[in-house]
Image (cartoon, rainbow, N blue to C red):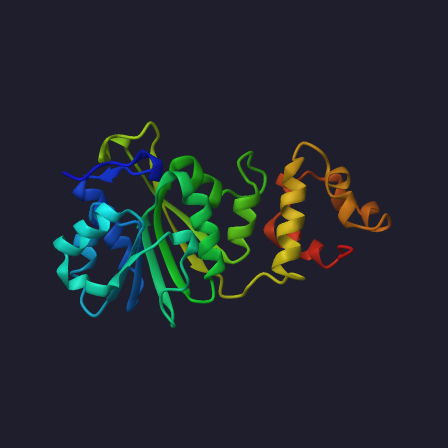
Amino acid sequence: MLQLKKSLGQHFLKDESVSRRIIEVLQQRPFKNLVEIGPGGGALTKYLTGLPGVHLKCIEIDDEKVRFLGNTFPGLGNNIIHADILKTSVPFNENFTIVGNFPYNISTQIIFKIIEWKMWVEVMVGMFQKEVAERIAAKEGSKIYGVTSVLVQAFFSVEYLFEVSEHAFNPPPKVKSAVIRMIPLETPVNMKSEKALRLLVKTAFNQRRKTLRNAVKSLFIYEELTDEIFNKRAEELSVQQFAELTFRMKQ
């Protein structure tokens, strides 16, 4: 019996229909290199190892789960990467697809890791806590639209696919889950730099109740702040508008 480690945000997926549905979504786009993040008890892995012509690598931090995966799926061999996903270097030297039932406690950090790997990522299909999934997919005008929404959607299109009951897991978490798909944008959003976009978005949403003029005044010269767009609040700006504003920043 595998031990559940709450410190790692583990909840074992037990509903086979959910696993099969995730695999079905995954196979809607072709790939040859696949990375599973946080395989845990192997609920998805047992389906992934059977995919023909696919080079699978699994990234798992938990010693016990690494041993279990090695014993249960001996064909994986050295393709089990025993490491912290947040400290892992790019697992392939060519394009790859990502799948996972991500641990809740670091799921947003995993998203930023995927952004870091965006040059190689073809598609990501992942399960998150429902409110995190909703936040990633949120559009401007929504109360949950924020830093994560903008920084993800600057590089990826996001599809909110389906929700998963807490009873699909053992033990059941206190929240529902949801599966999303992220696909790199065919035409990247034009911005001054990623660094500038991050600074602008984080500064704007840090005081989201204020108008942009008050929230981000330190980033612009006075003359720029007279533009009517600065009468808006952060949640009212589209990803494109944030990106356009980066060219007008002081630095």
Give the residue displayed 76% in from the left and 39% down from the top: 231
Give the farthest residue toward the bottom: 94
Give the quadrant of residue 8.
top left
Q: Position of residue 80 (x, y in %)?
A: 25, 59
In this rendering, would 160 be left or right of 5? Answer: right
- In the rendered image, residue 183, in percent from the top left (x then y), is placed at 42, 58
Question: Residue at the right extreme?
Answer: 223
Q: Residue at x 16, y 53 (%)?
A: 46
Q: Nearer the viewer, residue 37 or 193?
A: 37
Residue at 86% across, 50% down: 223
Side of 239 relative to 107 (left or right): right
Image position of 14 (left or right of 35): left
Identify the residue shown where x is 19% and y is 51%: 67
Image x and y of residue 94, in percent: 38, 72
Question: Who is closer to the viewer here, 175 or 189?
Answer: 175
Looking at the figure, which quarter contains the N terminus? Answer: top left
Total labels drawn: 0
Q: Which is more toward the observer, 81 or 237?
A: 81
Q: Residue furthest top?
A: 174
- Quadrant showing the C terminus: bottom right
Q: Position of residue 125 (x, y in %)?
A: 34, 53
